[in-house]
Amino acid sequence: MRFLRSRKVVQQDDSQIITAFRETGDTLYIGILFDRYCHLVFAVSMNYMKNEEDSKDVVLYVFEKLGNDLKKYDIKNFSSWLYSVTKHYCLRLLNKKPYSVHIDEELNYLVTEEDETDHRLTDRLLLFLDEAISELNEEQRTCIRLFYLEEKSYKEIEVITGYAYEKVKSHIQNGKRNMKIYLLKKNGKKR
């Protein structure tokens, strides 16, 4: 897919552009970020959506809401943050669809994100996703659902649940680990 990209080179780094946008509200700065990152957002989207039209829609959605997000959140590393927003939005879209082969990759990413080994999950594990989530304790289940399915940040989860920030982080990490263990057992593999 080809997006029209500006040939104009802007010398400011991302944080300077974000600061200028916050100060002026000028959407020109969103356009600069779009020029820099639209191809990367599209690539991440294609990885999850496996469909060019859906991926184009994801790109448009991410950049449409970017203005509000830049005003709302204190973003330290824009490219990492943008990747995370794109990934979570794709996962949320895929979660709304009936189970499909695309979920295999999102689940693989979910349960092996911090694991250096490459566990290829089979399609039959998809049948156990809801079961794996239901096997978590209440705190882990709540945090996993809010973080991955409702796209809430750690801070938002902290406010919603009343759990301390470190507890939210711990519940998500332990929940992912427990889901991985559960799903690998269902697939007949040892951890």
Image: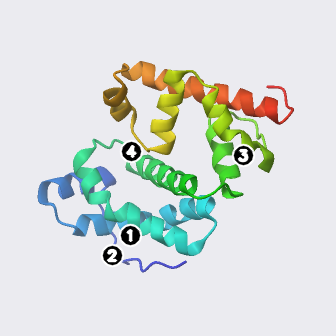
Three-letter amino acid code at the position of disc 2: Lys
Mark 2, residue position: 8
Classify mark 3: residues with Cα within 10 Å, few (<14), some (14-19) or many (20+): some
Residue contact at pointers 2 and 1, CB within 8 angstroms: yes
Element type at marker 2? loop
Element type at marker 3? helix
Mark 1, residue position: 35
Mark 3, residue position: 126
Among the two numbered marks 4 and 3 on one chain, the one whose residue lies closer to the N terminus: 4
Three-letter amino acid code at the position of disc 1: Asp
Among the two numbered marks 2 and 3 on one chain, the one whose residue lies closer to the N terminus: 2
Three-letter amino acid code at the position of disc 3: Leu
Pick the quarter of the image with the C terminus.
top right
Residue contact at pointers 4 and 3, CB within 8 angstroms: no
What's the CA distance linking mark 4 and mark 3? 33 Å
Residue 118 left/right relative to 16: right
- Measured as percent of width and height from the top left, residue 109 is found at 64, 44
Pick the quarter of the image with the N terminus.
bottom right
Residue at point 34%, 41% (across, down): 76
Residue 161, image quadrant: top left
Residue at point 36%, 19% (across, down): 164
Mark 4, residue position: 77
Three-letter amino acid code at the position of disc 4: Asn
Among the two numbered marks 2 and 4 on one chain, the one whose residue lies closer to the N terminus: 2
